[in-house]
Image (tube, helix red, strand yellow):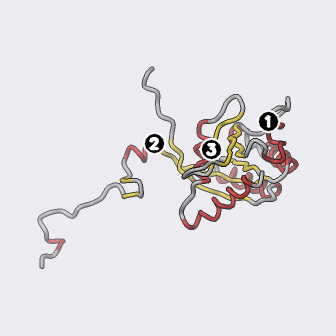
Amino acid sequence: MTDPCQSARPPQVTLWPETPIGPVSAVTLASTSKIRLVVGLITTPEEFARALEDLGARHLGSAQVRVIGQANALGGALGRWLEKPDAGGFSTWVVCQPAEGQFPWAFHPAGPAPLPAAEQDARALLELHQWALRRQAQQLDRHLRAGGALLLVEPHTDAEEWQASTALLRHASGGVQTHEITRLKRSVDSSG
């Protein structure tokens, strides 16, 4: 038997690990980024208003805050929120509705300027299949089906994550989750 260290042929090194959907490549790694989300499970219109007010007071801008909920979430108050002249506090509302098929939700943006990454984040949260995270995804699914809303905050620093978590722990009676997810970066338009 030959010692592998003495072999004339160098050992084979795998640069990119294999994943369930195929090998990870440099292109895949270059086109994704990891982001953190603090997710509050909001149950009432009052919680929603207080949470947005508290997040704003903590200098977490509306560009960092998104909402996921059905069209009639929070007893219809979420839909009426957008009709208010002084409505604000979040950048994008991703409307979800139960769907048939492999993925149990269909998404579409509400409002004038949807954030492209918002639907991607919603899909990532609700498609968590790792055994340790499946319970959290099921909790999010049950909350949405019961008419609740998810308030997502994307912190840029540890201090902002702490501020978002503190605010949502005070106001989100359905609970608070934190996640680190992979987001596809926008492709660069080469058409000029």
Is residue 77 toward the left or the right of residue 67 in the image?
A: right
Q: Amino acid at mark 2?
A: Ser
Tell me which residue sits at (60%, 49%) in the image.
100
In the figure, residue 70 lies in which quadrant? top right
| Residue occupying the far right of the picture | 46
Q: Amino acid at mark 1?
A: Gly
How many labels sit on residues? Answer: 3
Q: As displayed, is residue 42 above or below residue 118?
A: below
Q: Residues within 10 Å of mark 1 (few under 14, many from 20)?
A: some
Q: Which residue is mark 2?
A: 31
**Depth order, front residue of 21/165:** 21
The residue beneath circle 1 is 88
**Nearest the camera: 166 or 81?**
81
Mark 3 vs mark 2, CA separation in Å: 25 Å
Image-based side of 154 in relation to 12, left or right: right
Q: Residue at x 73, y 48 (%)?
A: 151
Q: Amino acid at mark 3?
A: Ala
| Residue highlighted by disc 3 | 106
Above or below — where is 83 with respect to 177? above
The Cα–Cα distance between marks 3 and 1, rounded to whole angstroms, is 24 Å
When asked about the image quadrant of residue 134, the answer is bottom right
**Label 3 environment density (alpha carbons within 10 Å; few <14, some 14–19, many ≥20):** some
Q: Which residue occupies the extreme bottom position in the image?
A: 1
Per the model, the C-alpha gap separating discs 1 and 2 is: 31 Å
Q: Where does the N terminus fall, quadrant-wise?
A: bottom left
Relative placement, left or right, of 20 versus 177 is left
State the residue in front, 95 or 124.
Answer: 95
